[in-house]
Amino acid sequence: MTGFQMNNKKQAGSLAVVPRHIAIIMDGNNRWARKRLMPGVAGHKAGVDAVKAMIEVCVEEGVEVLTLFAFSSENWQRPADEVGALMELFLSALRREVRKLGENGVRLRIIGDRSRFSRELQQAMLEAEQQTAHCSRLTLVIAANYGGQWDMAQAARSLAEEAVRGERTPASIDEQAIEARLSTAGLPLPDLCIRTGGEKRISNFLLWQLAYAELYFSDLYWPDFKHAALREAMCDFAGRQRRFGKTSDQIAAES
């Protein structure tokens, strides 16, 4: 697979309105492979090039955060050989691409419950994060063994433990307190959530964080969702009016 084709100089974005944070549900790898009479893992391997395309566009347009739903907490239910192949692909991709990420100013952050991954994979995750911790051009968030319900549950558990220790009162637990305990703490909330593959649901992805995100659904399978497709989604986003509970007239008066 080819490496990143990014320029080392920050490019000026071509869009008038750019989302700070794009989140993507990468769906359709298996169907892409099946259509070509190939094993499912071939679709996952082909999807790596789509990931690179997303990073390139996000850097060029000045997106701050790109979050990719790589492996959900429900994906363990898939056939064991597919899960095993995905773990091997994840490990090899981490080891192969981390240097390129660092060279292009991309900081890697992995969210989700790592306890079910092998020690080797957990160590590779930690090392990749450490090697790119100094980067500030783009934050690439990989959601692995992640579920939105798990995320809210672990945040609630953390706050409950503080209350039991007498470090906070139940009355102090508000939206801001919960958000600060989510795995995405410190990052801007997603502005745009994209799902490929033709399905129209969010599948337990960033349930809290997507409260006011714009949703965009593409019929393209993930391996086919490349530079032009992302730019089309971003153009669609740029044409939307985000009201956050206000009326159109209020938004117009504020602009």
Image (cartoon, rainbow, N blue to C red):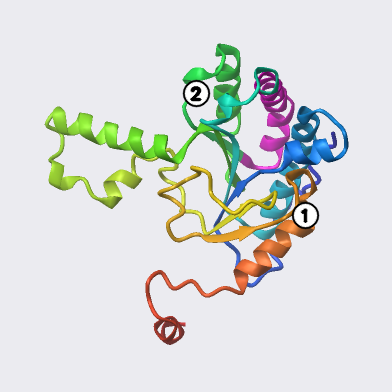
Location of residue 137 in the rendering, given as x and y in whole percent from the top left corner: 61, 48
Residue 105 percent across, percent down from the top left: 65, 42
Residue 136 vertical position relative to residue 127 in the rendered view, above or below: below
Measuring 62% from the left and 26% from the top, which residue is drawn there?
A: 78
For residue 191, say whether it is visible.
yes
Q: Amino acid at mark 2?
A: Arg
Which residue appears at 75% of the width and 58% of the height?
229
Name the amino acid, label 1.
Answer: His
**Residue 174: x percent and y percent?**
23, 50
Q: Which residues are magenta?
A: 83-106
Residue on which disc 2 sits: 114
Disc number at residue 227? Answer: 1
Mark 1: secondary structure: helix
In reply to whether residue 86 is colored magenta, the answer given is yes
Report x, y in % for residue 164: 15, 29
Dot 2 or dot 1: first in sequence order is 2
Q: Nearer the viewer, residue 158 or 203?
A: 203
Task: Place residue 142 in its image quadrant.
Answer: top right
